[in-house]
Structures are given as structure tokens and as C-alpha cells.
Image (cartoon, grey):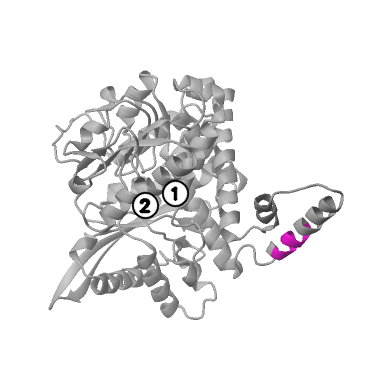
Amino acid sequence: MAASKTKTNTDELGFRESVELMFNRAASYMDLSPALIEKIRVCNATYIVRFGVKLRGEIKTFVGYRSVHSEHREPVKGGIRYSSHVNQDEVEALAALMTYKCALVEVPFGGSKGGLCINPKDWEPDELERITRRFTFELSRRDLIHPSLNVPAPDMGTSAREMSWMADEYRRLHNDNIDAMACVTGKPVHLGGIEGRVEATGRGVQYALREFFRHADDVKAAGLRGDLEDKIVIVQGLGNVGFHAAKFLSEEDGAKIVAVIEREGVVRNPDGIDIEKLKAHLNDRQPLKEYREAEFDEDGRAALTEKCDILIPAALEGQINLNNAHKIRAKLIIEAANGPVTAKADKILRDRGITVIPDMYANAGGVTVSYFEWVKNISHIRFGRMQRRAEEAKNRHLIEALESEGVKFSDEFRAEYLDGADELDLVRAGLDDTMRLAYQNIRQALIDKPELEDLRTAAFYVAIKDIALHYDSIGL
């Protein structure tokens, strides 16, 4: 993330090993057979494809992955990332997290993940489209993209644009499938996407924090008090997730974003950073160091260990590790990225009394709203279309009846109350409900089994219990 180099600790575990260690810790508190635990833990299959595309006058060969961790529920769900660092271990670890994440937030999907070993910045948009369409073809031949079997979504390095290409290519290959556009989620709204999908993961981080701050005992245990108002926040990574989380927390909850860490370094402003302005600056391809409304420093990694109330790692995995965990001074860490805290670093943080809201819960907003989009595509009707005006009519009758009895309402309240819920309202309400209930289930697990000790272990416990119950119900 930063220009300075950090010495690698040879005792550190890899990403997949970290996920498995965390899984094993939770599983050790469960009365399940070793064989069933192993069935839940292992990755079912990983497909590796090498395909060629003729670009710039010669054949370029690309390597892609699609890992299916668990098919206890179908379709399986998980993003596709474009990165030159994509590898099998990473994809399998992410697929496992997707399985547990879906179980935790009660989304009826199994876990999957995909990746293409490519740096998107090396290619023009028309070249990326050809590469993406060919990758889609390779996945489709093996039912690794399919509306009822395997449903990808955007991830690091991909967006609604790539999902549009994938959906269109799948539709061309399967033009007799009425549900073809449900083969991926994260599409533009005009191509079957859903309102609120782009913001979903960041919004989920906000809702997770709101729910955490509703529980005074949890807030006190983290060394905090009150609500999100004026809480000092440091964000690592201003991609889609980090941007929306920082934007909503600062604009709607009154939190103060005092530092943003990016690849080139960090910008700081003790009075708070205007996230919209900073994002616009970066979107204009202006260097971070030229942002004039905050102080720039090349040593971004050092900012991870600065004192703050809430630290939001929203970049890559393994950013908080054995090299810096003992220096972290945040009271609360919420994992907006996948796997930003390694397993051994997690133990250090736990021993130091630092509260961590785990990734499998905190960043579940994306898959939750992807589920809503998939349901929308399968049902072939947008949310709110059947009930919005009926809801408005009921509300109007109530307001008019009360006003006839002399009750007075402000114009602002009247307009807001009379406005029926549209798709975005319903998506946000559904996401909020999902994040609230999931946290309450994690918290209840901790109350019932105090030996779980922390939110991450409790989250794994809840997820494993759900998956084990499913296997038991089908006779395994």
C-alpha cells in the first residue's frame, strides 16, 4: 500500500492458511464429527483455465481460476477479480469465506470465487472486453457461470462493465434461457442490475457499525462510548468499498475521517477529509500527493498504527500482520476488505483487547444485495413495482383522515411519509435488516458460549453451525 518496504515475517501464514486456522478455532468448540468438519472446510473444486486471445498482432495467453468451495446450497456465489497477483490459494480462501459469509447472513448460496491473472490497466477497454468474453466462454462450457449453478459478481479490478460483458456473452451462448441475465450480479441497472448494488458493501460496513454501537456493552468493551458521531476514523483503500463506507459514515453519521491510505502513501487532515473531493481528485488521475486539502506522507503503512477510534482496512488481505499488529492503536477494527488481518495478527489483537468486526460479517453487504439482484432477475420484476402506489394511497388516506381531525403535519414530513418505498429504499431496508440480524446472531453465540471470546470466532461458529445443520438435514 505504501512506498516504504516492510520486512516479511517468515512465521506469517498465507491467506488460505489464516482462513483455515480461524475456521478450525471455531470448529473446535463444536460437537461435530471430524469428518463433517473436514467436509465443511475443504474446497470442492478449483478449475484453472489457460486461454489465448489474439491482441496487438500476437496471441496472448491468460490464466483464470474459478473455485467452488461448497455446493450445499446452489447457486454458488462469489466475485471475479482481475489482478496480476491472483493465484489458486487466494481464490480458494476467498471462496471459503463466501461460503461462511452467505451462511452467516442467511443468503441461500454456496461459496465460490474467481480470478483472472491480469492487470486491467495494461489493456484498452476493447481488449479487456475480448478477454472477458473469452473467459466467460471458458467458464460457461463447464457451467461455472450459470443462473442456477454459479453466479459471479464484481470484485477487485472488475465492475459493472465487466459484468455487462459477461452477461451478454452468456446470453448469446444460451439464448434459450429466459433467466440468462441472472448469470451474474453487479450489472448496470438498465441491464437487469439493482439500485444500491454499487454502494452495497460500503453501506453494509456502515450498517454493521451502527448495529455494533447499538449495544452499549460491546461499545464499552472496545473502550468507546456513545455513537458514531465525532469518532476518529482511518480508512485504508479508497476503492468502491472504502469510498462508500467513508462517505456514508462521515456524511450521515458524523464520523471524522482523519486519514486515507492509498498505494502512493497517506493523506491526513485532523479536521476531517472531504471524501467526495478526495475521490474526485483520484478519479481525475491526479497524484495523491497533489491533493491540497490534506497533508501527504509517503509512508502509508505507518498510518495503520496511528491512534484512532475506528480503523477500516478496505484494501488487500494481510495488511495487518505479525509485523504491525503489536503497534495497532485503533480501539475498533472493522474489516471492509477480505482477510486484511492475518490469523496470527488476529490473536495479537485479541490478546491486546482490540475489538475486530470480522470480514465475513462486515463486508457481507455486497453478496446480500447481489442476492436481491438475483431474485429480481429470476422473478423478472423490479422491487416496488407492485406495491409502491398502493402504499402511497394508504398513507394518503391516513394523513387526510388525521388532518380532517385537526392534526397538523409539516410539508416535509407529509411529502416523505406519502412517498412509497422504491427499489433503493427496499434494498437498503433489506440490507439493514440483514446486517442487524446477523450481528445479533453473532452476539447471541458469544452469550451462549463465552469461551468463543471474540466476534470472529463467534461468526465462524454461527456459519459452521448453519452449514452443518444443512448437511444433517440432507442425510450427510
Which residue is labeled 1 in the image? 201
Q: Which residue is drawn at 43% across and 35% down?
A: 255
Determine whether, in the image, residue 117 is placed left or right of residue 311: left
Task: Return the residue nearer the eye: 88 or 259.
Answer: 259
The answer for how far apart the CA atoms under marks 1 and 2 are is 8 Å
How far across and down, in percent of the image, does residue 17 sit?
31, 37
Query: What element does badge 2 sit on?
Result: helix
The answer to whether residue 116 of the structure is visible from this angle is yes
Q: Which residue is drawn at 22% across and 35% down?
A: 301
Q: Residues within 10 Å of mark 2 (few under 14, many from 20)?
A: some
Whether pointer 1 and pointer 2 mark residues with C-beta atoms closer than 8 Å, the reply is: yes
Task: Return the residue nearer the eye: 344 or 209.
Answer: 209
In the picture, the quarter occupied by the N terminus is top left
Q: Residues within 10 Å of mark 1 (few under 14, many from 20)?
A: many
Q: Image quadrant of residue 330?
A: top left
Magenta span: helix, strand or loop, mainly? helix
How far across and down, in percent of the image, does residue 471 sit?
56, 45
Q: Does the magenta stretch include residue 409?
A: no
Task: Return the residue nearer the eye: 149 or 101.
Answer: 101
Query: Earlier along the polypeptide chain: callout 1 or callout 2?
Result: 1
Determine whether, in the image, residue 342 is placed left or right of residue 453: left
How far across and down, in percent of the image, does residue 476 sit?
55, 45
Q: Residue 240 carries which label?
A: 2
Q: Which residue is drawn at 44% across and 76% down?
A: 171
Task: Tell me the magenta residue range.
Answer: 389-394
